[in-house]
Image: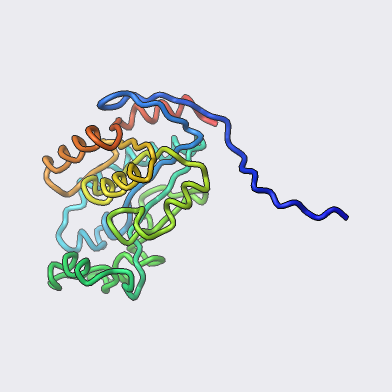
């Protein structure tokens, strides 16, 4: 009997090259090697009973991008582009979080922070597997989507995100979500440092920070890290490449 053969062959998908209008220039990339990364669209930041709203942070600007993200996730699935939800999700014992990080996030211990009890009785704040770390209940996460947890502003720090993407042959990342100047920007910067091509969908990202912070983020992305584009243009491009 012939022994089974161990195969290291990786089957590469046929290229699907597309060009997207963007700023500061159009960008050409392979949809077969791209993924849509949706950052921090989760209950603790968006739901009225979540951590941020309970702390007095107005969720309205963050909620305002739900229609755009819903349009993009639907279009990406139809075009066979993976949808990856990247959420805050810490250990219940906070063992991976440093004291300086906890001190800053809690305003020197004056407000609840990661893994503390939710002020509205929704379980521990932003803990993996708990309500606050789940995709916002008004969103349309589907079984075929990917979910990766992070415990820093950057989704590439000390977790499996890079491995998951490389195992799928992904080399271009399309970013949407919140906050554009915090976790979205930090993850996009690290993606660029890791060699990924980066597209920021500017009207599918939001922040509770002042407008000048958003504008500074867009300026830096266009100057240093990739391109920005709009939901309508990206959705149209994906529709033209439905699988």
Residue farthest along the bottom direction in this orientation: 93
- Between 206 and 25, the one lying in front of the other is 25
Residue at the image position 51 percent from the left and 51 percent from the top: 143
Quarter of the image that includes the N terminus: bottom right
Establish if 93 lies above or below 125: below
Drawn side of residue 219 relative to residue 164, left or right: left
Q: Tell me where residue 224 appears, x and y as whole percent.
A: 25, 36
Residue at the image position 14 percent from the left and 60 percent from the top: 56
Q: Tell me where residue 216 appears, x and y as whole percent.
A: 15, 39
Residue at the image position 34 percent from the left and 57 percent from the top: 157
- Between 114 and 118, the one lying in front of the other is 114
Q: How many tags in the picture?
A: 0
Establish if 44 lies above or below 41: below
Q: Tell me where residue 173 appears, x and y as whole percent.
A: 39, 40
Q: Which quarter of the picture shows residue 47?
A: bottom left
Quarter of the image that includes the C terminus: top right
Residue at the image position 52 percent from the left and 48 percent from the top: 167
């Amino acid at each position: 009997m012939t022994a089974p053969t161990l195969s290291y062959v990786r089957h590469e998908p046929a290229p699907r090259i597309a060009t997207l209008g963007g700023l500061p220039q159009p960008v050409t990339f392979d949809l077969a090697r791209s993924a849509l990364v949706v950052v921090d669209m989760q209950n603790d930041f968006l739901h009225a009973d979540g951590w941020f709203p309970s702390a007095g942070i107005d969720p309205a600007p963050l909620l305002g991008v739900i229609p755009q993200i819903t349009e993009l996730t639907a279009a990406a699935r139809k075009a066979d582009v993976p949808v990856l939800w990247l959420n805050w999700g810490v250990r219940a014992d906070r063992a991976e979080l440093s004291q300086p990080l906890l001190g800053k996030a809690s305003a020197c211990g004056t407000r609840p922070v990661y893994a503390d009890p939710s002020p509205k009785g929704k379980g521990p704040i932003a803990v993996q597997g708990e309500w606050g770390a789940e995709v916002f209940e008004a969103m349309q996460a589907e079984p075929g989507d990917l979910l990766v947890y992070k415990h820093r502003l950057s989704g590439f720090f000390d977790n499996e995100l890079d491995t998951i993407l490389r195992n799928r042959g992904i080399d271009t990342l399309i970013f949407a979500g919140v906050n554009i100047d915090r976790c979205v920007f930090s993850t996009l910067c690290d993606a660029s440092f890791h060699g990924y091509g980066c597209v920021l969908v500017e009207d599918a990202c939001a922040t509770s920070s002042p407008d000048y912070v958003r504008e500074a983020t867009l300026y830096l992305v266009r100057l240093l890290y990739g391109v920005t584009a709009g939901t309508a243009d990206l959705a149209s491009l994906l529709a033209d490449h439905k699988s």
